[in-house]
Image: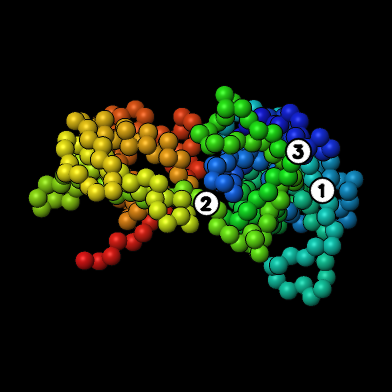
Amino acid sequence: MYSGDPLPRNPCKSRSVPGSRRKPVPIIRLYGVNQVGNSVLAHIHGFTPYFYCNAPPGFTSADCGKFRAALEHRLQSERRSQREVVNEIVLAVELVPNLQSLLGYHFETTTSFLKIYMAMPNFVPTAKGILERGLAVPGLNTRGFQCYEANVPFVLRFMIDTQVVGCNWIELPPGTYSRRPRSHQASSAQIEVDVVYDSIVSHAPDGDWQRVAPMRVLSFDIECAGRKGHFPDPLIDPVIQIANVVKVYGDKKPIVRNVFVTKSCSPIPGSQVLSFDREGDMMEAWSRFVRESDPDIITGYNVANFDLNYLMDRGEKLKLRNFTLLGRIIGRYALRGVAVWDRVRPWR
């Protein structure tokens, strides 16, 4: 998720864009791969963070405006940072009848709750704290409110409401999205689109939708020139080799098998050997290779706990400017938009 400008218009012309029309607004990045293997980044617009609190006795829909104004005033006065101007923090307050709390036993009785829509997810914890400590609302006096679902992370809230589960198929029907031209893309994905959240179709993993996408998988391993009797230290010991295999999930043969080495290396049958005089040149070439390979998944033996950390620390030691630009977001560090999975190295 990131904050950005509201979408000017809905690509689906029969609908308006929900949510705030003032920036900043929360935008969700959804990474994936289509049926023919193209990497896709969808910018999901219009989904608004929200949470609930109990409605006081006698509270009516006519009181929602007073409640919203009182909470807005307190939030604006308690803001810790003024770096980003947010003119309206509480977007709306809605009275929702006939709900039941899961806290305690209530038999079949229901009550009313307030559904509070916020401009950005980071304001939810602050609003929760204000309500639980007590909020003065004209005509209602000062009272505390029990909050519900305020601790649900924003992206998880989106997944629950749209029935998106891990690695399922998402469909963007024709006419519901706009494709960004290459010159306006924020990432290196082959296809980048903008779409409103209520236009997406999340398919349950049943029938034809159970098939696994043709994801590109990069498996790699590094070797270091360690000192005798010492565990390799990235501040001292150089990386001398990075071996790679790139494979499309479901294919029997890999599409790339290579090894990046410093100095020289004996030929390796079936693999391309890329030799470099300097360690820094070798590492930067490997970084470009990762970006150009555009992997959906990076895996290997303990890569998350050792190899990647070692490479990052070594790149910092060598002052390599672009080495850590391994993700899909242009100009951003770390592996954004790429899943990193470890395979546990067997004990020897």
SS at circle 3 = loop
Please tell me which residue lies in front, 73 or 106.
Answer: 106
Circle 1 sits on which residue?
94
Give the image quarter of residue 44. top right
Please tell me which residue lies in front, 1 or 22.
Answer: 1
Coloring scheme used: rainbow
Circle 2 sits on which residue?
214
Number of residues whose C-alpha sits closer than 10 Å to that of mark 2, classed few (under 14), some (14–19) or many (20 or more):
some
Q: Report the side of 218 relative to 282 (left or right).
A: right
Residue shown at 84% from the left, 62% from the top: 98
Circle 3 sits on which residue?
175
- How far is disc 3 from disc 2 in space, using C-alphas? 25 Å
Label 3 with label 2: CB-CB less than 8 Å: no
**As drawn, 321 above or below 301:** above
Q: Earlier in the sequence, mark 3 or mark 2?
A: 3
Type of amino acid under label 3: Gly
- How far is disc 1 from disc 3 in space, using C-alphas? 31 Å
Type of amino acid under label 1: Glu
